Image: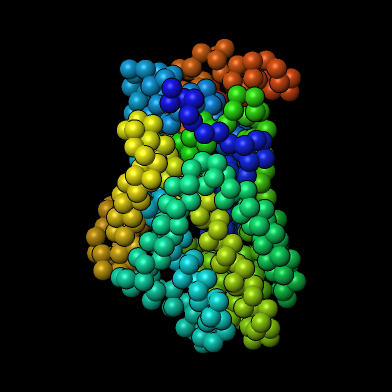
């Protein structure tokens, strides 16, 4: 049987590393700091942490329960657990959404390759400061180089995926996630020593609760889903490689803690550096590609070598973290093609690569030659980011929790969550988790989602 041939992750740590690899990515280093910057710093972080505990954790567990119960890809999972029902639309949504995400994600991953090369050449030290911010706009609007970098990024993900679940995904995340923590720690310690860094720390820890409105709540909730890779099937598929005797609560909790720690460390590192160079925190998506190189150039005036080294470490961190997430996004499509269309893994990976590469090229061109092409006023890149992170992820997360809360038998959910009643702590938490999954998560997402649409 195909089931017998399915690969499994090698153990608890390998599972957490792979899931944390998916969770930790551009969302932590690129999105989290600029969203926090735009939405009032500590106030945003406060809502983000609350949303992570009460919404994201239960949804993570819901996805993990479906994945491990079915030991199948997103389509196979619905076919096994709800055969012949409309739930198959959920699986179609969760095959398409990660492919849309990885297409534009890879474009940003490509930018980080270019910026790593620039750091290795110590370019931020030699370019006049006034030109640093315009350098980014100049680069992304070119037609060719960003596409070359996007190809290199996506190609690297594909190579890792071709090697398989154990020898590819597991091996890569096993060494890269610990390295990412070491790198971000070095960067953080350095940023905290910069003059004026404390202003950045204050911005991140002193909440101004008057800043919290529905826009902040929506952004924080969306970011929490995005950061934990929820609602688009990656956690489902990774959990389908988890063996029956592992503890899903521990995997979920471990992943969430690593992800939160990394986001906070990256947030503090970026904000302290940004404040110390006198740059505005609410610079938006350009924060790490425009403002930070400016910060590196400012640091280089007094310490050129240290600034050069830190910029290299920073862009390596972004690149590696983005790769582990890109791999998880592509794996959803690969698992579907291998298991449902019976393709060989290499062919399946190439097929996913070809589709996402094409969409990614169009996203990349939307900063330059295709900028005139607009969907509801957005460029293709902005549209893909918006539709996936504000719309598809929220819908997916809501449907996953409805599926576990209302469609699956409660006894099956209990069985999966507590490993047949053998995990004592999980038995004790079951009621609360089930309540959050069945009522709170779908309700809150529904309300916030509607209010966001009506605003
Ligand atoms: N969690 C990733 C990040 O924070 O960068 C992004 C991501 C990966 C989103 C995988 C969704 C996903 F399925």
Q: Nearer the viewer, residue 303 or 211?
A: 303
Q: Position of residue 205 (x, y in %)?
A: 70, 56
Identify whether 84 is placed above or below 249.
above
Identify whether 159 is placed above or below 128.
above
Residue 106 visible from this viewpoint: no
Residue at the location (55% across, 76% down)?
Answer: 119
Q: Position of residue 277 (x, y in %)?
A: 63, 76
**Horizontal placement of 382 versus 266: left or right?**
left
The quadrant holding residue 139 is bottom left
Q: Position of residue 410 (x, y in %)?
A: 55, 14
Q: Position of residue 241 (x, y in %)?
A: 53, 33
Q: Quadrant of the C terminus?
A: top left
Residue at the location (68% across, 78% down)?
Answer: 306
Residue at the location (49% across, 66% down)?
Answer: 112
Q: Quadrant of the N terminus?
A: top left
**Horizontal placement of 99 versus 447: left or right?**
left
Residue at the location (44% across, 53% down)?
Answer: 159
**Horizontal placement of 53 versus 225: left or right?**
right
Residue 363 visible from this viewpoint: yes
The total number of labels drawn is 0
């Amino acid at each position: 049987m195909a089931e017998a041939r399915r690969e499994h992750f090698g153990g608890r740590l390998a599972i957490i590393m792979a899931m944390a690899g998916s969770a930790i990515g551009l969302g932590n280093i690129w999105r989290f700091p600029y969203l926090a910057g735009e939405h009032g710093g500590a106030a945003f972080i406060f809502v983000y942490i609350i949303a992570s505990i009460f919404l994201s954790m239960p949804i993570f567990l819901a996805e993990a329960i479906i994945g491990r119960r079915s030991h199948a890809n997103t389509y196979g999972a619905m076919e096994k657990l709800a055969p012949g029902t409309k739930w198959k639309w959920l699986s179609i949504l969760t095959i398409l959404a990660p492919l849309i995400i990885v297409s534009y994600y890879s474009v940003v991953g490509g930018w980080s390759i270019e910026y790593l090369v620039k750091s290795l050449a110590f370019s931020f030290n030699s370019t006049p400061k006034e030109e640093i911010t315009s350098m980014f706009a100049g680069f992304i609007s070119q037609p060719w180089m960003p596409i070359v970098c996007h190809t290199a990024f996506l190609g690297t993900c594909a190579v890792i995926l071709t090697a398989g679940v154990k020898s590819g995904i597991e091996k890569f995340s096993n060494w890269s996630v610990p390295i990412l923590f070491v790198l971000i720690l070095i960067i953080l310690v350095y940023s905290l020593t910069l003059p004026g860094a404390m202003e950045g720390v204050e911005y991140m820890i002193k909440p101004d609760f008057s800043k919290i409105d529905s826009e902040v709540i929506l952004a924080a909730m969306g970011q929490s889903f995005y950061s934990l890779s929820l609602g688009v099937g990656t956690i489902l598929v990774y959990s389908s490689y988890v063996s029956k005797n592992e503890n899903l609560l521990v995997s979920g909790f471990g992943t969430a803690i690593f992800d939160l720690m990394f986001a906070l460390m990256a947030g503090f590192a970026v904000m302290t550096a940004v404040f110390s160079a006198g740059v505005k925190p609410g610079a938006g998506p350009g924060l790490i590609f425009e403002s930070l190189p400016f910060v590196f150039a400012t640091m280089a005036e007094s310490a050129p070598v240290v600034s050069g080294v830190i910029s290299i470490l920073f862009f390596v961190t972004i690149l590696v973290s983005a790769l582990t997430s890109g791999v998880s996004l592509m794996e959803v499509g690969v698992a579907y093609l291998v298991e449902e269309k019976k393709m060989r893994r290499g062919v399946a990976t190439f097929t996913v690569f070809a589709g996402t590469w094409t969409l990614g090229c169009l996203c990349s061109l939307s900063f330059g030659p295709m900028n005139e092409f607009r969907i509801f006023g957005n460029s293709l890149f902005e549209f893909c980011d918006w539709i996936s992170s504000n719309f598809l992820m929220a819908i997916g997360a809501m449907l996953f929790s409805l599926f576990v809360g209302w469609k699956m038998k409660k006894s099956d959910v209990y069985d999966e969550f507590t490993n047949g009643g053998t995990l004592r702590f999980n038995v004790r938490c079951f009621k609360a988790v089930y309540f959050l999954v069945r009522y709170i998560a779908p309700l809150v997402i529904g309300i916030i989602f509607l209010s966001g649409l009506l605003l």
